[in-house]
Image (tube, grey):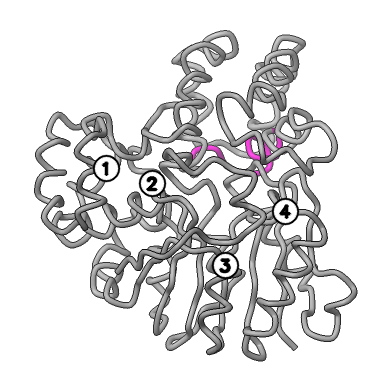
Amino acid sequence: MIRRLGRPRSEVQAKADFSRIRYAQVWEDADVLLEALRIRPGDRCLSIASAGDNALAMLTQNPASVVALDLSAPQIHCLELRVAAFRALEHPELLELVGSVPSARRRGLYQRCRPLLSPEARRFWDAQPVEEGIGRLGKFERYFALFRRFVLPFLLSGARVRELLTPKPEAERVAFFERHFNTGRYRLLMKLFFSRFVMGRLGRDPAFFYHAEGSVSAQVKARARHALTELEPAHNPYLHWILLGRHDSVLPLYLRPEHFATIRANLDRLSWERLSLEDYLAQHPEGFDRANLSDVFEYMSEEATEALLGALAAHLRPGGRLVYWNMIVPRSRPESLAHLLEPRLEEAERLHRQDKAFFYSRLVIEERK
């Protein structure tokens, strides 16, 4: 369900643009997220909606409910269309609609989902080029399409991309990286394409960098090396999409065939609202058990982060967990909340080393005492 409310009050809303699809996919590793959240059957969960991928992934754990929140109407529409697709389509057709696999019939697949959409979502999606694949229609995904078209050819040929995405031992992955990536050309292109200016103009919202510390390109370059050497690129759906513009059979969690029936069966446990976290907590005094907060604090000052974490902790049941990512804005529980929230540092560091969505500098897990 979608509940329409007045304009939410949030520092995030004051800084970011929510008038378009910014993320047509969720670029946060759901495998890591679910292990960090430790959702139990019967838990009440919150999630940032974004494109909906990870809110749907949370349904695989059989929670009592998942409430997905977002300030952006287009992001809510992304989630609503995915829910309709899980209801109206079969698994191979869902992959076609998203764009994970080739298809010449996406407009027809969308028409089968259309009757299940709200009037507002229907008007929105009727005007979108769904035949491209709904997972390609965000600003961030178009940014990576530019990378594939204009930057990647200067780094790797098509044959080399296929070689990169072929399973191999870590020593061979390191040798491949040193031979093809550890070059002056690679360092220059990374510095330019993943600079604050270019990423803010073509990829993420410029407000994302308001509180940023350090070099964005240096952070991405270091994490890319980790993803290309210490992790296996052949098993990385996020890297597959960046390099190929599709998933093929290397799928994010919510799209894997073994989860399709469970997610479909649990769709009635998922609801969504266009609402800030602050206003949701003010309107819902009942507690919750788990929260996927995405990277929401990247947009927020330390003072606003402390206030929101305090409100979340006040509603979080004992033993409950908050999970979120830092990229270039370091945010975590302040000392003023030490009596309420306990950081799970070793667990977070271990899971961060496994994170296939490799942009982030840190995973944060905080548990209610």
Is 363 or 7 nearer to us in this picture?
A: 7
* Chain-order first, disc 1 or disc 2: 2
Q: Which residue in the protein does label 4 denote?
A: 300
Contact, mark 2 vs mark 4 (Cβ under 8 Å): no
Q: How busy is the neighbourhood of tag 4: few (under 14 within 10 Å), some, or many (20 plus)? A: many
Give the residues in magenta: 225-234
Is 11 or 252 nearer to us in this picture?
A: 11
* Chain-order first, disc 1 or disc 4: 1
Q: Which mark is residue 158?
A: none
Side (left or right) of 183 relative to 233: right
Q: How busy is the neighbourhood of tag 1: few (under 14 within 10 Å), some, or many (20 plus)? A: some
Percent position of residue 66, x then y: 42, 74
Amino acid type, callout 3: Leu
Q: Which mark is residue 124?
A: 1
* x 46%, y 14%: residue: 149
Label 2's element?
helix
Contact, mark 3 vs mark 1 (Cβ under 8 Å): no
Residue 84 inside the magenta-drawn segment: no
Side (left or right) of 43 relative to 175: left
Query: Spatial distance from mark 2 to mark 3, Cα to Cα?
Result: 17 Å
Percent position of residue 89, x then y: 15, 54
Side (left or right) of 198 relative to 202: right
* Chain-order first, disc 4 or disc 3: 3
- Image quarter in which the N terminus is found: bottom left
Q: Is the residue 7 above or below the residue 175 in the image?
A: below
Magenta segment, principal secondary structure?
Answer: helix
Q: Which mark is residue 277?
A: 3
Residue 228 inside the magenta-drawn segment: yes
